[in-house]
Amino acid sequence: MHFPSTSIRAVISISAVILGATTVAAMAVKLPKGATPLSADEVRLIYSGKTGVYRGADTYYDPNGTTRGVFGKPKAVGTFKGTWTVKGNELCEYNKSKTDTKASTNCNAFWRVGNKIYALWSVHFDGSKPDKVNDYWVGEVKQHKKGDLVSKKYAAMGGE
């Protein structure tokens, strides 16, 4: 659930209506007892050199700590760029489109229980607060595909 900027709030609203609020609620779970935080290196492996294929945007996480992205689906409507960092078990990204006056922040934190990796969208770009009891899910890692699936679309749309 990574959305790059406030300029796509309309896209988010439309996506929420189409997909329905129950989709997210059905995927959310409680963090099991005994969950252990991932290390910073484990979190980097989830993102580095991969493309996050999300509901409203695709983001490439360059190993050099930069991001490039295209938002709007099924038809792309804009681009954004920024940076990503990892501290402890949490990755934060700071992205900005050409029309934004400031970068937006999204963060995800990660824990492991056995073979399952649980994620929490810990900082929301819009300032809303995460539910730190019931808002974990196990699908975040599966959204990341190896390689850069963004840069060609990004360049074609005039991304810098």
Image (cartoon, grey):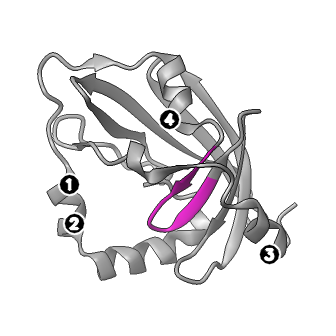
- Real-space CA distance between mark 4 and mark 1, rounded to the nearest whole angstrom: 20 Å
Relative image position of residue 15 (x, y in whole percent): 39, 76
Tell me where residue 74 appears, x and y as whole percent: 53, 82
Q: Nearer the viewer, residue 94 or 142?
A: 142
Task: Give amino acid for label 1.
Answer: Met
- What residue is shown at x 21% (from left), y 24% (from top)? 113
* Residue annotated with mark 2: 23
Q: Residues within 10 Å of mark 1 (few under 14, many from 20)?
A: few
Mark 4 and 3 residues: CB-CB less than 8 Å, in contact? no
Residue drawn 24% across the image and 35% down it: 132
Residue at left offset 49%, top offset 54%: 2
Q: CA distance from mark 2 to mark 3?
A: 31 Å
Residues tagged 2 and 1 counted as in contact (Cβ below 8 A): yes
In this rendering, the answer to whether 61 lies above or below 40 is: below
Compare marks 4 and 1 and give the one earlier in the sequence: 1
Viewport quadrant of the C terminus: bottom right
Magenta-span inclusion, residue 76: no
Q: Circle 1 is placed at which residue position?
A: 27
Q: Position of residue 114 (x, y in %)?
A: 21, 23
Say if the magenta span includes residue 54: yes
Badge 2 element: helix
Residue under pointer 4? 46
